[in-house]
């Protein structure tokens, strides 16, 4: 017979089984009268007991949502600047939506998640091959947070008392804001170095870098799509200052451009969701790869290969303390969101393409950008590209007429481009929108 005498019946939550007496004792111990007193929620956002959503049937709800979605503009996007859309094969869609992937929780228990852990191990292995660095993780939010983690890592491992992180003066504004937030309270300071016609002014960077520099960050391709031509020299500047060299890129670009390890990169960050996901403009997957020296400092989750009790190859989350999840003041990183499903899709897409397919896709990003820039430059009052450099996917367009007005006319014609300033637009072309480039040029001509 089960003894239930010690369990006092009450009507509370089965997941927080405190009796009224226990709750009262805890509230008295912390000096408040009710649970609500533990929270300081502003009156204007406090829940008033009503959601204001009228109940409706499934059919009514579908009709309402269809009407709402129908209000969206049908635009062909030539947008980039960190979010790049590539065709996602149906095999990725179908396999990633299998129930064993969609319903999987964070893979803490290796005895029941070997399949998913192996997939994540393969994802890490693909990043290792693409970057040339021996350690890659599988749970970064996006490129911006990966950059923030790289700066914090540099602040922890650098041997001297430096505190300055050097970044390009031309960088995506959101990435800069995230970086500022990540280093707030760490003692690190963010400073910028000049650019020269779209790439790093290495001489100016060398003058700025010194014993106070903990990390130098560069991008290839840059936020404007230019290809960095002096990566090895940037790495040498970082090495001479005893600073970490962090390189920003993405998984498609890595299929064609210089291997980061070969130019001296200590950490590689960037976007992995360029493959495996449609453009989400918010949700992403960050790349984080580094040298084995910093293995214990890697943020997020790391899947390792081991052996089980029978001597068979097995996979598990490794080299990670529980402090990351329960004692934030001692944690290397506080990344707790599980990005495994997104990483799975990226790994599937890369594997589907294979080495040759990845190179072909990356090469197309160079060819299509060059062809579109040439076509636009033939229009009167247009210069494209603005920077006399090689470009990957995207480029700047200078217009004699006001850029915002041209962008509005293009939108009216069914196209979306970025407005950079009063006379600068940015255009991004990939395999998804390449078939519409001629129509975009015609719309440009009409707008001009």
Image: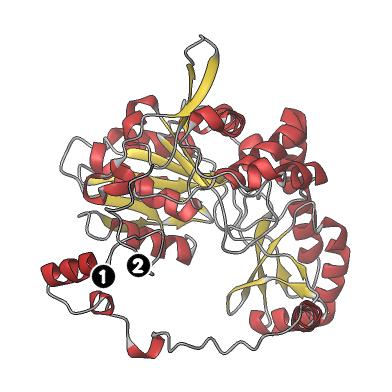
Residue 203, visible in the rendered structure = no
Q: Position of residue 317 (x, y in %)?
A: 45, 31
Left or right: 189 with respect to 258?
left
Identify the image quadrant of residue 77. bottom right
Residue 392, visible in the rendered structure = yes
Image point (56%, 43%), residue name? 340
Read off the residue under disc 2.
10
Quadrant of the drawing holding the N terminus: top left
Identify the mark nearer the N-term, 1 or 2. Answer: 2
Badge 1 vs badge 2, beta-carbon distance below 8 Å: yes
**Callout 2 secondary element:** loop
Read off the residue under disc 1.
20
Q: Can you say whether 92 is above or below 5 in the image?
A: above
Image point (50%, 38%), residue name? 107
Left or right: 333 with respect to 93?
left
Q: Which mark is residue 218?
A: none
Q: Position of residue 448 (x, y in %)?
A: 78, 81
How crowded pointer 1 is (Cα within 10 Å; few <14, some 14-19, many 20+) is rated as some
Q: Position of residue 39 (x, y in %)?
A: 27, 76
Q: Nearer the viewer, residue 96 or 360?
A: 96
Q: Nearer the viewer, residue 226 or 118?
A: 118
Q: Position of residue 47 (x, y in %)?
A: 42, 85
């Amino acid at each position: 017979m089960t003894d239930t005498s010690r369990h006092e019946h009450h009507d509370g939550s089965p997941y927080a089984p405190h009796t009224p007496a226990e709750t009262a004792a805890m509230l008295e111990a912390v000096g408040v009268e009710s649970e609500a007193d533990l929270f300081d929620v502003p009156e204007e956002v406090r829940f008033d007991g009503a959601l204001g959503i009228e109940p409706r049937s499934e059919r009514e709800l579908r009709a309402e949502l269809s009407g709402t979605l129908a209000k969206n503009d049908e635009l062909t996007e030539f947008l980039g600047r960190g979010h790049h859309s590539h065709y996602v094969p149906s095999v990725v869609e179908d396999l990633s939506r299998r129930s064993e992937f969609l319903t999987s929780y964070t893979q803490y228990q290796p005895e029941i998640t070997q399949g998913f852990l192996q997939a994540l191990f393969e994802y890490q292995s693909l990043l290792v091959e693409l970057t040339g660095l021996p350690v890659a993780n599988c749970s970064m939010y996006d490129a911006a947070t990966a950059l923030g983690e790289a700066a914090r890592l540099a602040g922890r491992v650098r041997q001297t008392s430096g505190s300055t992180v050097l970044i390009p003066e031309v960088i995506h504004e959101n990435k800069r804001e995230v970086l500022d937030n990540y280093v707030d309270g760490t003692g690190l300071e963010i400073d910028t170095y000049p650019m020269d016609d779209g790439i790093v002014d290495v001489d100016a960077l060398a003058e700025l870098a010194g014993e106070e520099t903990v990390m130098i960050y560069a991008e290839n391709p840059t936020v404007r799509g230019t290809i960095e031509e002096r990566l090895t020299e940037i790495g040498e500047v970082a090495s001479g200052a005893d600073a970490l060299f962090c390189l920003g890129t993405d998984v498609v670009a890595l299929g064609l451009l210089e291997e980061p390890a070969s130019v001296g990169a200590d950490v590689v960050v960037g976007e992995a969701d360029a493959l495996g996901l449609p453009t989400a403009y918010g949700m992403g997957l960050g790349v984080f790869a580094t040298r084995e020296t910093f293995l214990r400092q890697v943020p997020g989750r790391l899947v390792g290969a081991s052996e089980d009790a029978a001597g068979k190859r097995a996979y598990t989350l490794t080299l990670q303390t529980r402090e990351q999840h329960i004692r934030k003041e001692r944690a290397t990183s506080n990344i707790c969101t599980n990005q495994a499903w997104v990483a799975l899709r990226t790994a599937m897409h890369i594997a589907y393409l294979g080495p040759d397919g990845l190179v072909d896709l990356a090469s197309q990003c160079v060819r299509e950008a060059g062809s579109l820039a040439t076509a636009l430059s033939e229009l009167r009052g247009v210069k494209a590209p603005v920077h006399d450099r090689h470009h990957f996917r995207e480029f700047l367009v200078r217009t004699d007429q006001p850029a915002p007005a041209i962008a509005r006319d293009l939108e009216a014609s069914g196209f979306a481009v970025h407005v950079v300033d009063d006379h600068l637009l940015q255009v991004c072309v990939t395999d998804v929108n390449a078939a519409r480039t001629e129509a975009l040029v015609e719309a440009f001509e009409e707008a001009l």
